[in-house]
Amino acid sequence: MARLVTLGEILIQFNALNIGPLRHVTYFEKHVAGSEANYCVAFVKQGNECGIIARVGDDEFGYNIIEWLRGQGVDVSHIKIDKTAPTGIYFIQRHYPVPFKSYMIYYRKGSAGSKLSPEDVDEAYIKSADLVHSSGITLAISNTARDAVYKAFEFAKERSFDTNIRPVLWPKLEDAKKEILRLLNEYHPKFLITDTDDSAIIVGEADPDKAAKELSNYSEIIIMKLGAKGATLYYDGKKYYSSGYQVPVEDVVGAGDALGGTFLSLYFKGFELEKALDYAVVAATLNVMIRGDQENLPTTSDIEAFLKEMKKI
Ligand code: KDG
C-alpha cells in the first residue's frame, strides 16, 4: 500500500444551497474542504494511505475537520490544533454571474491553517511516505507555510505539485509565477498538475501542448486539467487526452483535486498512466455533480461501474 503525505490548509466550506449572488442566498451547507485534504481523501478512496500536515483552530470547525477526515480514513496524527487562531472558512457562490462556474469567497486571513510552519514538518513522517504533495495555495497563504513545503520536499522520496493559483491569495500574479517557478526549479516534482489559466501565468502559455512542453523542463508527468473537456497527460514525449462526460453540474470546486488525487493513487497502485487518467476524469466528473469537495469521491469499483455505463462526450 502506498503512502501520500500532503501539506496545506484544511478549510470549512459553506456552499450556497441556491444558485445566484450570495447577498440573496439564505441557506448554506457545510463541508470539509481545502485542496490538499481533498487530494488525501481521493488518494485514500483508491485503497492507499494518506496523512496531512496542517493546523486547525481550537474550535468547533477544527474538530469537525479532524473528525471528518479521520472518518474518511485519513491519518490525522499530524494535524495540529493551534490555539492562537481560528479555522479558516470560505463561501461558494454558484452559477452566477457565469453559469457552471463557482466563486470562492475566503475568510481565512490569519487563520490557524496559514500558521503552518516548518516546525510542523516531522522528518521521519515525510521519509515514511512514497510521495509528498502540496500546491500553489500553500505557497500563497504565508511565508511559514511555504517554508514548510520546502522542508517537506527536501526530505521527500518523490514529489507532486498542483499549481492551483488562487489569484486573490497572491499580492500580484507575478508573485505566483515567481514562487511556483522557484519551487519547480528547485525540486522538479515528478508529477505536476495544472490547467491553462495557471500555465498562462507560470510559463506564459495558455495552449495546453505548448505549455506542457515548457513545463516538461521541470516535471516528468504533467496533467493538464481541461474542465468539462477532461484532461491531457504528457509523459515520455507522449500525449494522451481523456475526454470528459456530460453530466449536470452542481459545483465545480474540488474537481481538479479529485482528478489529481485519484490519478496519483492509481499510479501507485500500478495502473498504466493513461488508464489512471481515464479513471481520474471519472472522479472529477462525479465531483462536479454535488456540492462539497469530498463526498462524491469514488472508489476504484465505483469508477468501474461508471465506466461500464457512461459514454464520453
Ligand atoms: O481545489 C478546491 C479548493 O480550492 C477548495 O477546497 C478551497 O483549498 C481551497 C482553496 O484554498 O482555494
Image (tube, rainbow, N blue to C red):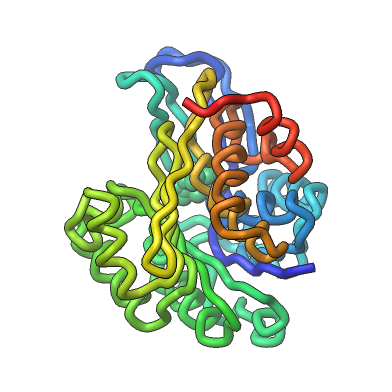
Residue 231 in sight from this viewpoint: yes
- At a point 67% along the width and 34% down the height, the residue shown is 296
Q: Where does the image place residue 143, in percent across and percent down from the top left?
A: 39, 72
Residue 136 in sight from this viewpoint: no
- At a point 42% along the width and 69% down the height, the residue shown is 236
Question: Observer-nearest residue: 273 or 56?
Answer: 273
Left/right placement of residue 42 relative to residue 104 reads: right
- At a point 26% along the width and 58% down the height, the residue shown is 211
Q: Is residue 225 above or below residue 202?
A: above
Left/right placement of residue 218 relative to residue 201 reads: right
Left/right placement of residue 153 relative to residue 302 reads: left
Q: Is residue 133 above or below residue 42?
A: below
Q: Residue furthest front?
A: 238
Q: Where does the image place residue 76, in percent across and percent down from the top left?
A: 75, 62
Total of numbered circles in the picture?
A: 0
Question: Observer-nearest residue: 82 or 223?
Answer: 223
Question: Observer-nearest residue: 263 or 182?
Answer: 263
Q: Where does the image place residue 37, in percent across and percent down from the top left?
A: 62, 54
Q: Quadrant of residue 181?
A: bottom left
Q: Which quadrant, please, contains the N terminus? A: bottom right
Question: Observer-nearest residue: 103 or 259?
Answer: 259
Q: Is residue 15 above or below residue 212?
A: above
Q: Where does the image place residue 67, in percent across and percent down from the top left?
A: 79, 49
- At a point 61% along the width and 40% down the height, the residue shown is 283
